Amino acid sequence: MKNTVFTGAATAIVTPLTRDGVDYEAFARLIDWQIAEGIAAIVVAGTTGESATLNDKEHREVISFAVKQVAGRVPVIAGAGSNDTAYGVDLARHACEAGADALLAVTPYYNKATQKGLIANYTAMADASTKPIILYNVPSRTGCNILPETCRVLAEHPMIVGIKEASGDISQIAETARLVEGKMDIYSGNDDQIIPVMALGGKGVISVLSNVLPRRTQAMCERFLAGDVAGSRDEQLKLLPLVHALFSEVNPIPVKAALARMGFVENTLRLPMTPMEEAHEAVLLQEMRAAGIDV
């Protein structure tokens, strides 16, 4: 059997930025707080980490820094993948050499791929990797959907151990769970579907919500796994208004605004992303307070 990279909530952590580059002091504080709050793993240089506008040097440095800062306390999962398979392979090799515990590999975007192309892309990455790979299915961003039958094929590769499912399609996720037969761990990629995905056998979530509520997001997963289905369901429903506010604009715009109000980071994004609209931010702050966050 393949080893599970993590169980519970992994934070898809933001990358603190200033006008001059990455704010590594803020990044260290944020990582340490997340671990102190009990998060199960850290995902670095993913969508929430603004990987699309990190240059190549920054992308690699952010991964290396996170590995050193975490220092083995929880697994570090490094964002990888590209619309250029050769570059994705190169990023995967770097993440392995930097000491990441696993990779999160997004589907090719813009030029997309057929299902045959996805199998070839991920096989090339997995063959080059010395660390386990979690596939990342987010068709709303990439225009490319990993179908259940493709997951069944990829689950046979010894280095492909999981999938972050952000398609939002519960029926598709159920079919994937049926076809992979436990050979691939499934994680929710949407914070409003944590418990539904876990009810289908999922191991947890790769979360945006946990940037601001790491302890409660992890506890929600742990309650479900401990058999407290009603309690975990109630927490999922209670946090839905905050989740909706965190996605009222394109991620990571709202979560950057939230963490700035909490004092962790500057509210600095790179174009084409711009700071949150005032009306949306007012609702976000209201829901943060309702969830017990001091802002």
Image (cartoon, rainbow, N blue to C red):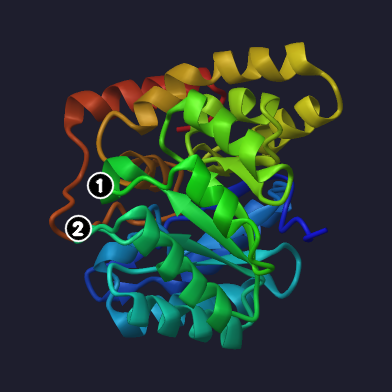
Rate crowding at label 1 as few (under 14), some (14 to 19) or many (20 or more) other CA atoms within 10 Å: some
Q: Quadrant of the N terminus?
A: bottom right
Question: Relative to the observer, which residue lies in front, 113 or 210?
Answer: 113
- Residue shown at 56%/63% (left/top)? 29
Instruction: Please say whether residue 224 is visible from this viewpoint.
Output: yes
Would you say 99 lies left or right of 83 here?
right
Residue 257, image x, y percentages: 33, 42
**Can you tell which quarter of the image residue 215 is in?**
top right
Instruction: Please say whether residue 33 is visible from this viewpoint.
Output: no
Question: Relative to the observer, which residue lies in front, 170 or 234?
Answer: 170
Of the numbered discs in the image, which one, if any, rests on residue 143?
1
Residue on which disc 2 sits: 110
**Can you tell which quarter of the image residue 77 is in?**
bottom right
Element marked by disc 2: loop
Residue 106, image x, y percentages: 41, 59
Q: Say what amino acid the circle numbered 1 marks.
A: Gly
| Dots 2, 1 in contact, CB < 8 A | yes
- Residue shown at 69%/24% (left/top)? 199
What separation in Å lies between label 2 and label 1 (alpha carbons)?
A: 7 Å
Would you say 40 lies left or right of 116 here?
right
- Residue shown at 37%/54% (left/top)? 115
- Residue shown at 25%/76% (left/top)? 20
Total label count? 2
Residue 40, image x, y percentages: 71, 51
Q: Which of the two labelled residues, at mark 2 and mark 1, occupies the earlier sequence position? A: 2
